[in-house]
Amino acid sequence: MMDLRELYQEIILDHGRHPRNFRVIETPTHSAQGHNPLCGDRVTVYLTLEGDRIADVSFQGRGCAISTAAASLMTEVLKGKTVADASALFAQFHSRVTGGPASDELPEPLAEDMERLEPLTGVKAYPARVKCATLSWHALEAALRGGDPGKTVKTE
């Protein structure tokens, strides 16, 4: 029987090879670019907000399997969520991938989404890979803040 670590690796490889929501949204309401200078990963996150709800989210870019899988999984869990939900998920995700203490308990629907992100939490054993796993989330935050469209968020 395949152990949990092998299953997580398969999920990461599948999302890395066949990313979901890998496209440009024609008329996004928000977008931001992210760059990890350490390894060269680049991502652009596109959002369409309807009120405070994420109606659509996608990404494009190039990077390692972890970076691509993280962006793919992120877009899957964020569709239909509120901006507050996205912030809560990122706080919990960031805490788990950095080996920090778990933040506040998430309500049940968000806890299920956090379980979908669990395969990426193994990067905490490899500090340089944490930046790969969080790059798309940092770009998402920059997009939601409505930062300078020409500016790229860096992980450094």
Image (cartoon, rainbow, N blue to C red):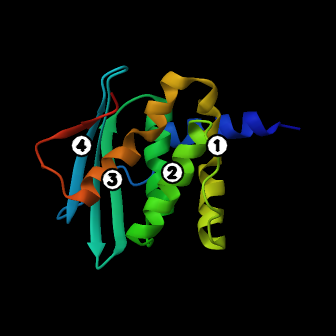
User: On the picture, is 9 further left or further right than 74?
Assistant: right
- Outermost residue to the right: 1
- Residue 46 screen position, x and y as percent: 27, 56
Q: Residue at x 50, y 61 (%)?
A: 88
Amino acid identity at mark 1: Pro
Q: Earlier in the sequence, mark 4 or mark 2?
A: 4
- Pointer 2 and pointer 1: residues touching (CB < 8 Å)? yes
- Pointer 3 and pointer 1: residues touching (CB < 8 Å)? no
Q: Earlier in the sequence, mark 3 or mark 2?
A: 2
User: Crowding at label 1, few (<14), some or many (≥20) Cα neighbours within 10 Å?
Assistant: many
Amino acid identity at mark 2: Leu
Label 3 vs label 2, nearer the camera: 3
Residue 73 tag number: 2
- Regarding mark 3 in the picture, which secondary structure is present there? helix
**Quadrant of the rendering where the C terminus is positioned:** top left
Label 4 vs label 2, nearer the camera: 4
44 and 87: which one is in front? 87
Q: Is residue 19 visible?
A: no
- Residue 55 screen position, x and y as percent: 35, 72
According to the picture, the residue beneath numbered tag 3 turns out to be: 141
- Pointer 4 and pointer 2: residues touching (CB < 8 Å)? no
Cα separation, mark 4 vs mark 2, equals 18 Å
Q: Residue at x 51, y 51 (%)?
A: 73
27 and 81: which one is in front? 81
Amino acid identity at mark 3: Glu
Label 3 vs label 4, nearer the camera: 3
- Residue 7 screen position, x and y as percent: 73, 40
Residue 33 tag number: 4
Q: Earlier in the sequence, mark 2 or mark 1?
A: 2
Q: Earlier in the sequence, mark 3 or mark 4?
A: 4
According to the picture, the residue beneath numbered tag 1 turns out to be: 119
